Amino acid sequence: MPRAAAILLACLVPAAGLTDTPLVEAGRTIFVETCASCHGETGQSVSIGDIRGTRLSTLRRVPNGFEQMPPIALTEDEIAAIAAYLAALAAADP
Ligand code: HEC
């Protein structure tokens, strides 16, 4: 590809260097709308802790809630998207 196009593409990649697949993008949207009020946009709330890279098996428990976290209804697709977003965040900043 021409050099100018390569540079333009590099600039379009988000600053955090996230692997931006459609699933990650969908997960980001759901997370920002549903989870970020408590967990922050990147899952690094100081008071709650870092939930980047949370395993799918743990995220499947979100609809039941955790000890101090209210239950939040999510479809299996939404859970998979959130898992992809949290995994991409962890991979971008190990
Ligand atoms: C009303 C505030 C609030 C919202 C909204 C919220 N959480 Fe939480 N979450 C918490 C609190 C507080 C904790 C830590 C205490 C606990 O374990 O209950 C927590 C813990 C977690 C944990 C760690 C659980 C563990 O034991 O490892 C995960 C994963 C998590 N939340 C995911 C999510 C996801 C995904 C969403 C959005 C669908 C979400 N949370 C929305 C408050 C919230």
Image (tube, rainbow, N blue to C red):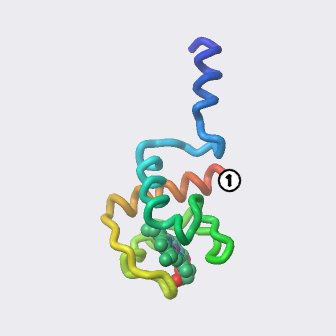
Identify the residue at horizontal 42%, vertical 43% (top origin). Answer: 22
Q: In the picture, which quadrant includes the C terminus?
A: bottom right
Q: Residues within 10 Å of mark 1 (few under 14, many from 20)?
A: few
Question: In the figure, is residue 77 to the left or right of 67?
Answer: left
Identify the residue at horizontal 65%, vertical 46% (top origin). Answer: 16
Q: Amino acid at mark 1?
A: Asp
Front position in the image: 62 or 87: 62
- Vertical comparison of 2 with 7: above or below: above
Q: Quadrant of residue 19?
A: top right
- Vertical comparison of 20 with 29: above or below: above
Return the x and y of residue 76 as percentages of the image width and height.
32, 64
Identify the residue at horizontal 65%, vertical 41% (top origin). Answer: 15
Check disc 1 and report the residue beneath it: 93
Identify the residue at horizontal 60%, vertical 12% (top origin). Answer: 2
Return the x and y of residue 46 as percentages of the image width and height.
68, 72
Q: In the picture, which quadrant includes the N terminus?
A: top right
Front position in the image: 90 or 26: 26
Q: Quadrant of residue 56?
A: bottom left
Task: Identify the element where label 1 is drawn.
Answer: loop
Question: In the figure, is residue 42 to the left or right of 94?
Answer: left
Q: Is mark 1 within 8 Å of ligand 1?
A: no
Q: Residue furthest left?
A: 75
- Vertical comparison of 90 with 37: above or below: above
Return the x and y of residue 65 as percentages of the image width and height.
42, 81
Question: In the figure, is residue 48 to the left or right of 30?
Answer: right
